[in-house]
Image: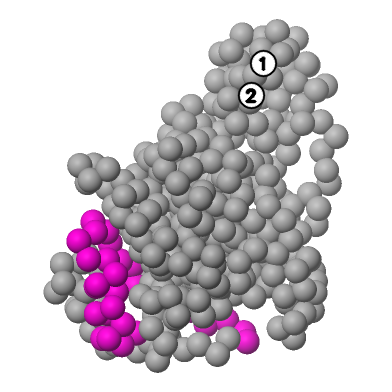
Amino acid sequence: MIATQPNLLDFSSTSLTALMQAWGEPAFRATQLIQWLYQKGVTDIDQMSNISKVFREKLKSDACIQRLEVMFDQIARDGTRKWLFRLYDGNAIETVFIPEKTRGTLCVSSQVGCALNCSFCSTGKEGFNRNLSLAEIIGQVVMAKSLLNPDEKITNVVMMGMGEPLLNYQPVIDAMDLMMDDHAFGLSKYRVTLSTSGVVPQMLQLKNDSPVSLAVSLHAPTNSLREQLVPLNKKYPLEVLIPVCRDYFPKDSKRCIVFEYVMLKGMNDSLTHAKQLIRLLDNMPCKVNLIPFNPFPGTNYICSNWETIVAFQDRLGKAGIKTWIRKTRGEDIDGACGQLAGDFDDRTGRRARMGGKNSKKI
């Protein structure tokens, strides 16, 4: 249901401060509200006990707190947890929490579906409906925090869920700012990561607007192969993308881009491909994250066998490129990388062309 009053979760720190000033309230009111909304997670304005009753009445008449609705809550055998959240328009998105011994990583969506059509990704095959609002992005973090067990904490957030974050630029920036705000979630810039398929103009803008960590979905060492896997490469080919990556972080900062590389049997996993990747990334401070392909209905791709993945890692490592193999998590609940699909009306017709129904409504 669409809220009749402005949702307080839909305000950035800056816009909330401006709203307080427009209401004739001191700027510190915005800080108080952020603490109540995100640190303390209140759902009722009357719970804001250090705010005067007069101002609480003003808030109740002119604003609201509208959270996402939980449709499904699934826990995998390995402890990975996936939620399906209903949005106000009836569409739904997926969010995944990955618990580990020393950290808890929340994978957050930025769009309803995905406007891109990467051939190995379940989300892309489901089509696209719309961008998420700030409240719908930061609301995933709010809901996850409220639903997790007391011994589970969100220490890292990755914008790697449904959608291409840089195609929903300002709401994503505002949400990440709240994730790093000491009065909200207080995460370090090193613990908030945005993953992009390589939307170059917005990458250049992000470099100036936000200090978050950056991951780039590379998946191929040549233009011809990458265009098959990541169609965006036709618009921003490797000779455009790689120089931006090379100069993204200052060379004296010790920060570097992580390149994501899904391992597809017979497609991009040979030692020849490894050598091409080494040449592409030559003398660039970076890390490579090899991702075993996670299957989904209708795909023709197969995951590379383990020996091939290890050999690929070994070849990159010998060339001096720090390379990890990502552990597959949540595969039994379709919560692994590339498997998120949500539940939404596809406005692109992509799903129908693939032989599916236009609506996945449950």
Answer with the quarter of the image where residue 2 lies: top right
Residue at image coords 71%, 25%: 45
- Residue 293 percent across, percent down from the top left: 45, 79
The answer to whether any part of residue 46 appears in the image is yes
Residue type for callout 1: Met
- Residue 342 percent across, percent down from the top left: 67, 65
Question: Crowding near pointer 2: few (<14 within 10 Å), some, many (20+)?
Answer: many
**Element marked by disc 1:** helix
> Residue 64's mark?
none
Answer with the quarter of the image where residue 117 lies: bottom right
Q: Is residue 167 left or right of residue 353?
A: left
Residue at image coords 28%, 62%: 287
Residue type for callout 2: Leu
Instruction: Find the magenta span and give its range.
Output: 269-298
Residue on which disc 1 sits:
20
Residue at image coords 48%, 27%: 183
> Residue 16's mark?
2
Q: Quadrant of the C terminus?
A: bottom right
Q: Nearer the viewer, residue 123 or 187?
A: 123
